Amino acid sequence: MENIFAGLVLFPFLIALALVFVKTNTGRRITVYSGCGIIMAAVALFAGNTIFTGTTRTAFPSTHAIDMVMLCAEFAIMILVVVLSTKHKKHYCSLLSIAQTLLIAYIELTKPLHEPVAHVVSDRLSAVMCLIVGIIGCLICIYAVGYMRRYHEHHKEYADRRTFFFPMLFVFIGAMFGLVLSSNLIWIYFFWEITSVSSFLLIGYTKTKEAIKNSFRALWMNLLGGLAFAIGIGICVFKLDVYTLGDLVASTGDMAVLAVCLLGIAGLTKSAQLPFSRWLLGAMVAPTPTSALLHSATMVKAGVYLLIRLSPAMTGNYAGMIVSLIGGITFFVASMLAITHSDGKKILAYSTVSNLGLITACAGVGIEEGAWAGILLMIFHAVSKSMLFQGVGAIENTTGSRDIEDMHGLICKLPKLAVIMMIGIIGMFIAPFGMLVSKWAALKAYIDADNVILVCLLCFGSSTTLFYWAKWLGKVLTHVAGVKPMTDLTTNGQWVSMWIHAALGILLCALFPVISLLAIEPMLHEMFGSVNAHILTVEDMIIMVLMLFIIMVIPFISKILVKRFPYKPSLEYMSGINMGDNRKFDDAMHEDKKVFLAGWYMEDMFGERKLWIPSVAVSTAVIVIILIMAVGGAI
Amino acid sequence: MAKISRSPWILHYDGSSCNGCDIETLACLTPVYDAERFGVINTGDPRHADILLITGGINTQNKPIVEQLYSQMPKPKVVVAIGICACNGGVFKDCYNIIGGVDKVLPVDIYVPGCAARPEAIIDGIVKAVALFQEKHDKYEAEKKEGLQ
Amino acid sequence: MITQIICALLYVIIAPFLGGLLAGIDRKITARMQGRIGPSIFQPFYDVAKLLNKQIMKINNMQYPFALCFLIFVVITGALFFGGADILLVFFTLTTAALFFILEAATTNSPFSVMGSEREIIQMLAYEPMMLLVAVGFYMANGTFSVAEIINAEYSSILRMPGLFIGFLYILTIKLRKSPFDLSTSHHAHQEVVKGITTELSGRMFAFVEIAHWYENVFLLGVIGLFIINASWWSIPLALVVIALCYFMEILIDNCSARVKWNLMFRSAWLVTLIFGVANIIILQYVLK
């Protein structure tokens, strides 16, 4: 186990190191492809093995050397942050970084761990996480090779820093492996910090003013979470005498609740919940693979991973209250905000925030059904969202725009990419696809947890979610007469990645009962002790799978229909004044006027200007008030 | 063969008329005459329509519009010209902009004369159009069977 | 299990006749309310028979499959409901069906169609929360989502969820495409803006959509019945009476109200959901439990 852990964590770092020195396109491609291939194969083997054998806990005999290396690395990170913050005059970032690093150093040096504890725990949850990180993350890296080449062809104004970009992607993946496999809180914290800082560096990739501003916003928010994490560890070590996540979940008492609260807040910052959502929205300035990686496979999933781990400790206490309330509010508010945007990546960002809110709320209710829904949501969301980001990135590279109004008629312009977008979008909100199945289970979990507020937020939020996806899907599928297909600039690597995602997305929907049975239910059994036999009944699952098949048949039905009723170009109804090409009509001055069909955005109803400040205020109030209550309870 | 004459849906287009015939036509569709009891619906959409009612003559500006509306109606379809202007241009016949009756641009099936056409005449015209609609439909079905359509 | 499958099959076979008849009765009553004789109550069947025989004019290749899928998924929705499946699943399937309907119009790029499809999404935005809350309410009142078990409850669900019933009637006006909420398309006043989402449908495609609406209406009235039906035999005739009353009321509202703007529909629907739906849920949770 030690070797597997070391291998999974260190191998991406090695690839990263190699990529620093590879300067040619071909060399980079070969390195990335082979590295990703090895990681994916290793992860699949490891995860498959873990899912069938179950949990293994490994206690390292002596970790003094490793701890010291980590401590040094933490100081190095701190110095990096301080230097960069001072350079850009963002001193609050330095303060946050120094505070938490010193706190962790103090903990490690004054109360080192003597008896061997399980430093590394590989159970089914970490196996599933490894799969998400390994497969989706690596596919994004493969996609990034082609994408970044086109990106720099398009954007000559940005310095080509690919020798920096690709290593950071792999550092990210390595750190994520470390995070999900460690059980020792200080180790988790260490990997947590690496992801914070590397996301900061990736967001600032283009070095424009906006990029720097947004990257520092991401940094301070995540460092704030890191600080909460560090204080949480402090409480664990000094007050509870607990060193691992597993022990923390098992421990009881008001102090433990406070520690869980603090760790929960760390999870909320990382998973970009309100009031910390801004950083993820700002992360859109970075090249698309960064966004895809942050949004689907890694960064934000680290936050919800931690929350799901803590879920059994959040049943009906202050920690659960913070996490579930914030999750519910975020789900609803972010889905409303997504309606008002036309920038494709902005919508995806808000939808990520919103879906993470749902997962967070699932974790926060602290019952096994919630965790079941949360884990499934995490899996499906990772696949669909990563695919959507890649699709939008590829569209932007070809058409030069990622605005959904410009995707009007995409099915005619770029049919293959439109199909990718379609699979991604229907996967996000429509029965019988994954996200909806999980949402359904989430609704059941909220009801069973007697949480009426969450139930109502979910009901309202799912209608707003429906709105922006349906609008977008309609745009993509619009058939605009006379539009010639464009030359698709998408590279083969990108296609491979996107098609694998599409296949994965559909396969997962067909196989989710099996996944649930093999991986998730045994895992919940371990986490919660007992578990309802089935969260969704077998019949319901069968019906869902049948419906999936019906949907899969549609393309064939339409083939037959097209053959039987051949399409003859005909005029669309425009009150008789269609100019003959379905694109223009005859206006009052007897001149041709182009038809322009825009979607609904309802700025005045759901606009950021109206909703942002109240929602941040409410969510901040929720966190502060409940945290004060938790502190009061603990003291 | 299906009895389709029970559901004639009408599209009404006002050419360059004096509005007299329009008022009479719409009057036929009011509750007083209750055309709906025969299944007649005054639809605003050529895609749903079976019978095209045109009042007023054709001028250079509305010619393409009339042609387009006709082309957007699915087969089988019937054209009814209502009022003398629609039949042959009427009093506007010699105006510089008038091309003539509807039959200059479309194959008119039923002519309903009058200035303005009386409701009884219009209803009579529609009844004839409905019979013709059934006839055309039967022919259309036969052609479809032979593979001509 | 066997009875459930039979019920589902019965729905698939009978619902179109029932739905068509309901539409015919609707037109007849509407005509009488307006002082007319009105068409035969079989008029909807004549219309659909005609549409099935007319030429198909496709605007693009996606339109026809989507219209067909709308029909298929509405049938699945109703079959699941009358087969006694999970009511949440039923509502989710209905949403999928509605999405196909929206896509059918959105793919055309025709101004009236696309506007209709966008209005349809707004309508979904307005009624979706209430619909899910109704499902939640059934669960809280009866401890199960399964329709088969809800109808075997000791008491009628409406006794515990009157607020949800009122809220459901409110959104039923949207779902049945009745005034004042017939924004995306209307069964009356056949004008271009109003025909909205169905503007570009011709011949058989339009017939499919009509039939789908019949299926949908029978299903929606079935949900009203679900509020009433309990284990006793007399609840079934009672349910039929309530359904008839509700349907008559919808027709009455349809005939004596004018179409409203979308934001009034949306705001009022959410307000009703909040006042009647959420309040009822809270009472169910904290008072009646």
Image (cartoon, rainbow, N blue to C red):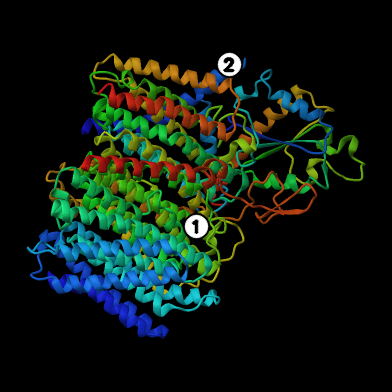
Task: Identify residue for label 2.
Answer: C33
Say which chain tag 1 marks.
A
* Quarter the N terminus of chain C occupies: top left
| Residue A482 shows in the view | yes
Seen in the picture, residue A605 relative to A213 is either above or below; the reply is: above
The kind of residue tagged 2 is Met
Residue drawn at x 89%, y 38% as measured from the top left: B92
Q: Secondary structure at mark 1?
A: helix
**Residue A260 place in picture, x, y as percent:** 23, 49
| Total numbered badges shown on the rendered structure | 2
Q: Secondary structure at mark 2?
A: helix
State left or right for residue A342 relative to residue A172.
right
**Residue B46 place in picture, x, y as percent:** 64, 41
Seen in the picture, residue A17 relative to A579 is either above or below; the reply is: below
Classify residue A186 by image quadrant: bottom left
State left or right for residue A354 relative to residue C264.
left
Q: Are marks 1 and 2 on the same chain?
A: no
Q: Label 1 crowding class (10 Å Cα cut-off): few <14, some 14-19, many 20+?
A: many
Q: Label 1 to label 2, Cα distance in Å?
A: 50 Å
Task: Name the one closer to the observer, C87 or B57.
Answer: C87
State left or right for residue A448 relative to residue A293.
left
Residue drawn at x 49%, y 66% as measured from the top left: A211
| Residue A130 shows in the view | no
Task: Name the one closer to the observer, A593 or C205.
Answer: A593
Task: Identify residue for label 1.
Answer: A344
Q: Label 2 crowding class (10 Å Cα cut-off): few <14, some 14-19, many 20+?
A: some
The kind of residue tagged 1 is Gly
**Residue A486 place in picture, x, y as percent:** 55, 68
User: Which numbered disc, 1 or 2, marks the residue closer to the eye?
Assistant: 1
Give the number of the disc on residue A352: none
**Residue B52 place in picture, x, y as percent:** 69, 37
State left or right for residue B102 relative to residue C241.
right
